[in-house]
Amino acid sequence: MILVKLGGSVITDKSKLRTFRKGSCERLARELLASRDDLLLVHGAGSFGHIEAKKYGLHKGFKNNSQLEHVAMVQRDVRELNLKVLEALIDEGVRAVSVPPAAAATFRNGSVVSFEPDVFGVVVGIGLVPVSFGDVVPDEVMGFSICSGDLVMEALAQSFKPKLVVFCTDVDGVYESDPKRDKNAELISRFDAKSLRTLRKTESKHADVTGSIYGKLERMLAISRDCEKCMIVNGNVPGRLGKALRGEAVVSTVVVPR
Amino acid sequence: MILVKLGGSVITDKSKLRTFRKGSCERLARELLASRDDLLLVHGAGSFGHIEAKKYGLHKGFKNNSQLEHVAMVQRDVRELNLKVLEALIDEGVRAVSVPPAAAATFRNGSVVSFEPDVFGVVVGIGLVPVSFGDVVPDEVMGFSICSGDLVMEALAQSFKPKLVVFCTDVDGVYESDPKRDKNAELISRFDAKSLRTLRKTESKHADVTGSIYGKLERMLAISRDCEKCMIVNGNVPGRLGKALRGEAVVSTVVVPR
């Protein structure tokens, strides 16, 4: 079993509302065909989710009725992205089937309180590829909350103990300083809990309602305990995902528990 | 609580592959605003599902690998329809949120074996309108199977015991003979188990992988036991759904257990 996240920053233009990067998604779909293993896919919401969700405070849960039409619109937008991803995958030969996070998980205070992996398991069992995604979800305490793609990744890793987990992002991996600001930033090839402590907390320049880079790295460290290998690769560089799936050496950060 | 099915024959052209009837769907959305009660919606798959599902025998479950790409394509098509329905509803002011059947139910041999209504309940509880639909679903025995919109209606009626259930179809109700063939066909205003026994089994002229009219009526009879009133109305006649929701007299068939 291999678990792959197609980052919202790779399949969408995160700075422009609802902008799908079709070509990138189709190329990644072709690279996924390199895998001979069962596949589980998750994609981020990118600019189909974060921008509006942040604007209307959807990550804070139900505060007033005026949010509700935006909950409806954002979940619609995210499903539009999911449909585009499904189409790109199916066109390239990946037999993709949509599985929204609320089909398997229930949520309380923005956290997963139960996760039934069977819906993913049955789909994989017959040779299809489940595709989950970051979404606005019903929340037993907050009314609704945001389930990030990374949260789905964590739940899937815990349930399926995949041999390989790959996060496709728009950077080569984790750097000692922000590579978007510092040209001499050094890539960390092996990232562990100690690296996290020494890394200065940085903030992404684009809207993100699912936590800082720091929070994402904590989640990846947790995931690295549930798989044989956990990697961050640059999904914008053609071939890197395919190489990672074939077990070839590739520019990346490998995340390890310690 | 009111439960409404937007039939596939009303929101799509059932004879033409993937043809959405946007105007009809938007009008029905406006009529839904007549309801002051909590709403649960289900829509059929119409020509986004039945035609291809029948062509590749998807209602028979997993037979061979060549079906899998069609499972992927049909679930994608059905989600395209769901997205169009969501858009029409949201544009008209219905705060619609997509809930695919597999988000609440698990399936064995084409039947629902478990149904967790919470995902619908939480959505309704904060003032949103869940929208489920006929879908290709994971099936623990058959690999995959077809969950009809009517099957979702039955599970929802059992769980929520709505005061009113309305099926919007392309006919005025149940006739003593097929109104599409017999101009003098008489509308049955009150349909019960005895009516079903006397009714001759008829077959729809369009592709339908979710059973005959006869099977649909059996399901409606079962649903009528879980609600105060169960009606079939013609969704193609402007105003009928709205009248039914306001409790006004309207041309229809009322389905009663006995």
Image (cartoon, coloured by chain):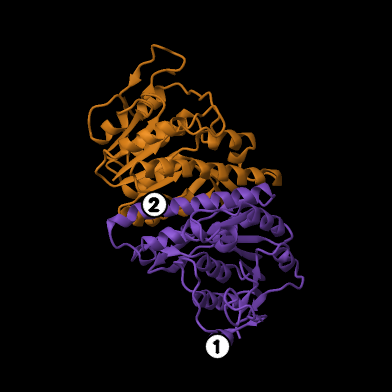
Chain colours: A purple, B orange
B244, A186: nearer the viewer? A186
Amino acid type for the residue under numbered disc 1: Thr
- Residue at 48% x, 40% y is B148
- What chain is tagged by disc 1? A
The residue sitting at 58% across, 81% down in the picture is A177
Circle nearer the viewer, 2 or 1 = 1
Question: Is B51 rendered above or below residue A34?
Answer: above
Residue at 49% x, 34% y is B20
The chain under label 2 reads A
The reply to whether residue B115 is visible in this rendering is no
Which quarter of the figure has residue B150?
top left
Q: Within the image, what quadrant is residue A229 found in? A: bottom right
Q: Which residue is mark 2?
A: A72
Label 2 residue SS? helix
Res. A6 mark? none
Pick the residue in front: A148 or A115.
A148
> Earlier along the polypeptide chain: callout 2 or callout 1?
2
Q: Quadrant of the C terminus of chain B?
A: top left
Disc 1 target residue = A198
